[in-house]
Amino acid sequence: SNHKQQQQQQQQQTSTEPCRWRLLDEHGRQTWHYLQTDEETRSWPQSAADKYHLGLATGLPDLPPAKTPLASVDNALSFFSQLQLPPGNWGCEYGGPMFLLPGLIVTWYVTETPIPEAYRIEIKNYLFARQNPQDGGWGLHIEAESSVFGTAMNYTALRLLGAAAEEPRMIRARGLLHEMGGAVNGPHWAKFWLSVLGVCKWDVVNPVPPELWLLPDWVPIAPWRWWIHMRQVFLPMSFVYSRRWSHPPDPLTSQLRQELFTQPFDSIDFLSHRNSISPRDNFHPKTWFLNTINWTLVNIWNPYLRTSSLVDRAEAWTWNLIQREDENTDYANLGPVNGPMNFLACYIQEGSNSYSVRRHRERMDDFLWVKAEGMLMNGTNGVQNWDTSFLIQAVVEAGLAQEYKWRPMLIKALEYLEDSQIREDCRDQEVSYRHPRKGAWAFSTKDQGYTVSDCTAEGVKAVMMLQNISGFPRMLSEERIHDAIDILLTMQNASGGCSSYEPTRGSEYMEYLNAAEVFGRIMVEYDYPECTTACVTALSLFTQHYPNYRKDDIAVFKGRALAYIRKAQRADGSWYGSWGICFTYAGMFALESLASVGEIYSNSERVRRGCQFLLDKQMDDGGWGENYRSCETGVYSQHENSQVVQTAWACIALMEAEYPDKGPIEKALTMIMKRQQVNGEWLQEAIEGVFNKSCMISYPNYKFIFPIKALGMFAKRFGNDRLL
Ligand code: LAN
């Protein structure tokens, strides 16, 4: 009974003590730990970074007010350098998407994984903190309007974490869910997770046939051709779907069966709701083509043609591919959706105590992050390589790499990049359809280990800027730099552009089979001005220092890449951005590409149009502010407030283009400097990043990195005169 009492007390406990949380960073693997005893807290003190991320006072000093751009950079670096983590990388919250935690919570629940009490409390806090105040629901991402996906899934997650159905905030959420027609109106992924949990019947899930993995490679729709995130989610999903595995009903899920729908569970004809979807979720409606295929799969293929030997073969092969993904990443997995799903597949196949399940359990912690609002799930296992590479570049661009003061920070950062460059290709590269990776950098860590074109490019640029330009020790040999260049040279598409993880493997028509409903442009790799620019500028910098290595390949690559950049420009002078919001972000990259081959304002009509597009958007206070609606609609959408990050992007774009009048840039940077706090930091503003057109994602370190770069570039070009 003592134990029971304790449990009850815990149930009531609604927050943890912020002073007990610590971030551990082992070679970039970031996990949060809640220290139970005072002895532990004494022997592992909280760092400034811990405090900052938890929203506690950092104790970092007030600084002399900055009057000049370089003084502002100095203040910013004084602050930001204190957030560098021991291995040399920077970390941060990488939240935004609101559909990740529910997948994890359902997985934990059905795999009988105990949730540490401190996690349980803080995840609950986060989900409640992010409940939309207007209507009590949740959307696809933190700034989105409520949808069935967000509301049904986060409501379910909260119930699994112990929130009571009668709690007022839950009553409100349920009311909204019912107004939207209940969980049967959720998108495909919601229906999948709810069926796994046993609160929907599998009939409601549109087919996810693992047989597709048996198609020969030449078939135009074979899964190996899909965008890597889609096929790696489809993989474990198809395995679980094939088994129609569900958690056996228990008292809690029986209650959920009654709470999530507008009519009694037993009276619901789940099969008839396969295609039910609320208009709020239907961002990318399914095509008649996909609907026909689904109909055929449900009514003809599954009942009559799907023989048991075919099922066995399909399940055996998908299971094999799941294991390869697990082994190649040491169970870190590509991302936050396939991670929990692979975990679930291992549980179904190998049972609760298997090595695979135990290792997956540990790896889930890599995705979690604690902040003042509570605990959230990051969009990847971190932003390590990406932000660290950019910070190095910003300091070098600002002309500060030689400064004694910043040397320890930069050495550490270089050590991190050294440690995290991928040194070997995957063991089963061909069979598991992996792109070469020796010499590449991933977005996050070496364990995750997926080549990304621009992460490799930004990484190798940062290394060269330190080693070849700024006289830093050669931690990466010439051979390793060549390895990175070799990878970049594999990344080009027939169009001349570059994609994210691999060159495009399938046709754009594959989008007709996009079944996710909530995302656009997900089925195959596309060309991106951002990724293309990163590759072009890395190759340019490389040839300056290694003029002979693969000279001709590089020249051809660059010529074709530039042709793509020119072609991707819209008539109004803009470029559409896919990974940051939106035209401002892509404009910065595209103009940098053009400048890297000498195409600038004075000699290029197209650059003038690019600059004019941006200048027309400058706001009265000198800043830029673009709303995330741009990403959804493809039309520039003005934010009501100017944003430090986008203002920095626009300034960098104009300076790259050598826009002749420093007036607008000076005005913009003055605005940025006015927003800097006395300790050198900038405060968080609107969300910065995006993926798949509809989902926004946070890049909190951008508010340091890009102002530092813009201010530094300005001082270099126009002098370090007083602006304030
Ligand atoms: C990312 C994050 C980084 C991003 C850049 C490097 C910025 C970009 O230039 C290339 C694409 C890449 C690597 C990228 C791809 C898609 C990711 C992994 C994400 C936006 C972070 C989260 C997102 C992932 C797909 C989220 C899980 C959701 C699914 C729909 C599977």
Image (cartoon, rainbow, N blue to C red):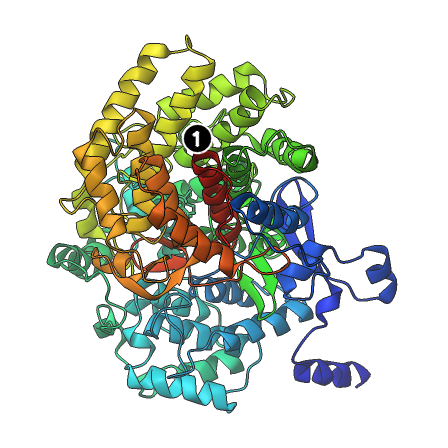
Establish if 128 lies above or below 191.
below
- Where residue 178 sits, quadrant-wise, is bottom left
Q: Position of residue 130 (x, y in %)?
A: 48, 74
Question: 4 or 651: nearer the eye?
Answer: 651
**How many numbered callouts?**
1
Establish if 585 lies above or below 400.
below
Secondary structure beneath dot 1 equals: helix
Q: Is residue 706 left or right of residue 521?
A: right
Residue lying at the far right in this picture: please name it: 39
Q: Amino acid at mark 1?
A: Ala
Q: Residues within 10 Å of mark 1 (few under 14, many from 20)?
A: many
Which residue is located at x 26 percent, y 72 percent? 280
Q: Decide if ligand 1 comes within 8 Å of the CB at mark 1.
A: no
Residue lying at the far front in this picture: please name it: 722
Q: Position of residue 518 (x, y in %)?
A: 29, 62
Establish if 24 lies above or below 124.
above
Which residue is located at x 21 percent, y 39 percent? 608
Q: Is residue 522 left or right of residue 416?
A: left
Kindly identify which residue carries mark 1: 457
Question: 470 or 715: nearer the eye?
Answer: 715
What is the quadrant of the N terminus in the image?
Answer: bottom right
Q: In this rendering, does residue 651 appear at all?
A: yes
Which residue is located at x 31 percent, y 11 percent? 552
Q: Position of residue 530 (x, y in %)?
A: 34, 39
Establish if 329 lies above or below 464.
below
- Where residue 14 sits, quadrant-wise, is bottom right
Question: 444 or 57: nearer the eye?
Answer: 57
Q: Is residue 429 left or right of residue 292?
A: right
Which residue is located at x 69 percent, y 32 percent? 404
Q: Is residue 187 left or right of residue 647?
A: left
Q: Position of residue 145 (x, y in %)?
A: 33, 73
